[in-house]
Structures are given as C-alpha cells and as structure tokens.
Amino acid sequence: LTLAEMKREHPEALAPKELKPSTRHGPPKFTEQPVMNLVTSKNFVVANAVETILAAPKKLPEGAKDYLKKEDYGKVPKYLMHIKQDIDAEYQYIRQLQEQQAAERDVVHPLSDEERQHMLEGLKAKWEQVNTAYQAETHQTKLDTMGKMKRKEKNEAELMQIEKDIEKLSKKSIMVNTAM
C-alpha cells in the first residue's frame, strides 16, 4: 500500500498511539497579575566585565590538536606557490611588452627637416616631369587607341599620387618607421 492509499483506507493506523506530555503550561490566567515595578541597582556591564576578568581560563580538551607540530607548519601553502607563479608570469609578460614598446619607439623616429626638404624637391621634380608628359598628350582630343587612354589614365593617377605625397610631406612633424 502507498501512503495515499493508507490515508484513504486506514487513517486510524496513521494516528499516534500516545501523545507526549506538554512541557508548556499555556498562557497566564486572566486573574494572575504580572510583577510590576521591579528595579535593580546592579550595573550589568561592570558586573559582566568583573566576572569575565576573574574567571579562570578555559582548559583545552586533551584531544586538542597542536598545530605547531604539523608536518607542513611554517611552509608556504601550495596554492600560494601557484598564485606566486601566476604573478611572476604576469610581471614577465608586462616586462616583455615594455621591452617591445621601447624597441618600437627606437624604430620610429622623426624625419629631419633637411631630409623632408630634399624629398619635397625630388617629388616636385618628378611632378614636373610627369606633368610635362601629361600636357604633351592632353592636346589630343581623339583618344582612339587603348595605349593612349591607358597612358593618360596612368599619368593622371601618378600626378594625383605625387600631389598627395607632397601634401603629406608639407606637414611639419613626420615620423618615420625604419623597421620596414
């Protein structure tokens, strides 16, 4: 039988055989008066402090473990060794990053003013040369062959690129990456 069947068919079998006597006596009777106006002159804070100071120290049970005699007493725990290794690895990684950044800073340096002027003059001369070739072809209004069209497009693209380079080199501070 299951519990549900037992409850349906034989509920008297589940009832307790005897009841424990009650330890509570219930609420006070209506006729009983509570004790009123009890006042004491005892200072409980001072009394507790004096009692604690004068009390004998508690005795340790005989089975108390002596932690000073443990085999690993005074040794660094394994989990702290792992944490220390992790911290050392992080410091190593940070040092490596700092060294890389220092090496990158050495690789990138500012372009000197005379180098910049020399490059600008070279670009302007190149622009003049490409522009002369372009001007020689622009008077032709009939671009009938593929070669003529390709040459014109190539010259236009080259002129635009040289102009962009001249514009970039016209800035005052230019950083050069010598790693490439």
Image: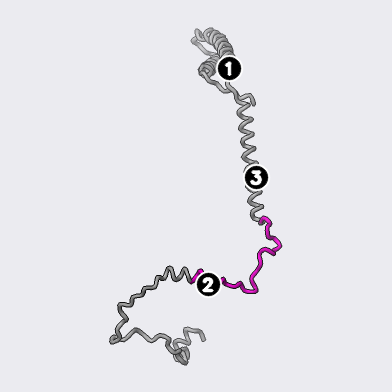
Count of number-bearing discs: 3
How far apart are labels 1 and 3 at the CA level?
41 Å
Dot 1, crowdedness within 10 Å: few (<14), some or many (≥20)?
few
Q: Which residue is mark 3?
A: 89
Quarter of the image holding residue 109?
Answer: top right
Q: Is residue 163 left or right of residue 32?
A: right
Of the residues under marks 2 and 3, which one precedes in the sequence?
A: 2
- Which numbered circle lies on residue 112? 1
Position of 178 compared to 20: left or right? right
Which residue corresponds to the image point at 63% horizontal and 51% vertical from the top-left? 83
Q: Which residue is pictured at 36% across the width and 73% down the height?
A: 41
| Three-letter amino acid code at the position of disc 3 | Ala
User: For residue 56: magenta?
Assistant: yes
Q: Is residue 119 above or below residue 9?
A: above
* CB contact under 8 Å: marks 2 and 3: no
Look at the image and tell me whether residue 9 can be seen.
no
Q: Is residue 104 above or below residue 164?
A: below
Look at the image and give the residue range highlighted in magenta. 51-76
Q: Secondary structure at mark 2?
A: loop
6 versus 128 height, above or below: below
- According to the picture, the residue beneath numbered tag 2 turns out to be 55
Q: Main secondary structure of the magenta part?
A: loop
